Image: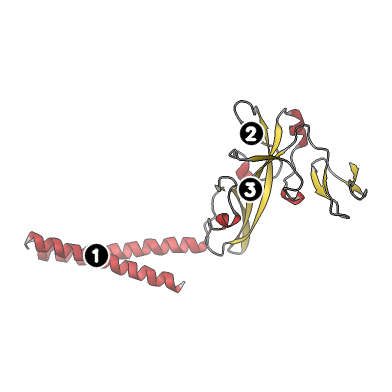
């Protein structure tokens, strides 16, 4: 399909999935064959920095806003939404985005490369309209590779599971090891003390047991703080 730029007149070759593009000669924004029902943009409610704070420090390499098209039908009654794109995002196969504040599509509100192309055949067969829902594409720095994860820009919910890094795995193992060491130390001290103090007065016995419980816990806490400070 060939069109002419509305500003400079240059010819552009577009494909069926193109809807919104930028002229490479004059930078004009061009809407290509808009659907019968004017699309809408859902306004983001969650800031980019909020999404960054969902991940450990240093894990996020980039956060980019993308708008994924959904088809909304039966607007007057129950809201029915289905995906209207062919991008291979497995985590979005069964995901229904929440409703949000919507604005009629305007080319000044979004960059062309932020829009995921919608399936025109599906849009033409339906009596609904295309709703572009915002997601943050979060690129993560992992051990030797990078991975993308989606976050809903309206609810702030992460789509999919956060990958477990080697650092988090080692941290969990260290925590479990500290627990076992503390438990073993408590048993080593408490078993002989139990037999030595079982005939003592109850008031003194309760005080001794209080110190027996507190001291190992304090040592374990101090030890974990030292290890955390070394990282």
Q: Is residue 22 left or right of residue 218?
A: right
Q: CA distance from mark 3 to mark 1?
A: 48 Å
Dot 2: element: strand
Element marked by disc 1: helix
Q: Which numbered disc flags the more N-terminal residue, 2 or 3?
A: 2
Left of 98 or right of it: where is 208? left
Between 173 and 2, the one nearer to me in the picture: 2
On screen, residue 147 above or below 44: below
- As drawn, the residue found furthest toward the bottom would be 230
Q: Give the residue pinned by disc 1.
A: 214
Q: Which mark is residue 194?
A: none
For discs 3 and 1, the disc positioned in front in the rendered view: 3
Instruction: Using the rendered view, name the quadrant where residue 175 is placed.
Output: bottom left
Report the residue at 24% width, 64% height from top: 214
Q: In which image quadrant can residue 58 be found?
A: bottom right
Residue 188 at x, y percent in the picture: 22, 66
- Dot 1 or dot 2, earlier in sequence: 2
In the rendered image, residue 12, in percent from the top left (x then y), is placed at: 89, 47
Position of residue 151 relative to residue 105, above or below, is below
């Amino acid at each position: 399909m060939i069109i002419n730029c509305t500003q400079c007149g240059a010819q552009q070759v577009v494909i069926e999935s193109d809807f919104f593009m930028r002229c490479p000669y004059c930078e004009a924004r061009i809407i290509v064959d808009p659907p019968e029902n004017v699309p809408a943009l859902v306004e983001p409610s969650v800031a980019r920095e909020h999404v960054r704070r969902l991940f450990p420090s240093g894990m996020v390499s980039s956060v980019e806003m993308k708008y994924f098209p959904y088809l909304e039908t039966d607007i007057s009654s129950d809201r029915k939404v289905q995906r209207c794109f062919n991008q291979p995002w497995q985590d979005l196969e069964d995901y229904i985005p929440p409703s949000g504040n919507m604005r009629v599509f305007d080319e000044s509100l979004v960059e062309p490369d932020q829009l995921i192309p919608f399936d025109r055949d599906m849009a033409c067969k339906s009596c609904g309209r295309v709703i572009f829902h915002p997601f943050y594409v979060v690129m993560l720095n992992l051990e030797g590779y990078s991975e993308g994860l989606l976050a809903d820009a309206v609810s702030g919910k992460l789509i999919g599971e956060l990958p477990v890094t080697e650092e988090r795995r080692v941290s969990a193992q260290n925590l479990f090891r500290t627990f076992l060491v503390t438990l073993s130390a408590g048993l080593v001290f408490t078993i002989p003390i139990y037999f030595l103090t079982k005939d003592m007065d109850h008031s003194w016995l309760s005080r001794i047991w209080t110190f027996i419980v507190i001291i190992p816990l304090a040592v374990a806490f101090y030890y974990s703080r030292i290890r955390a400070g070394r990282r």
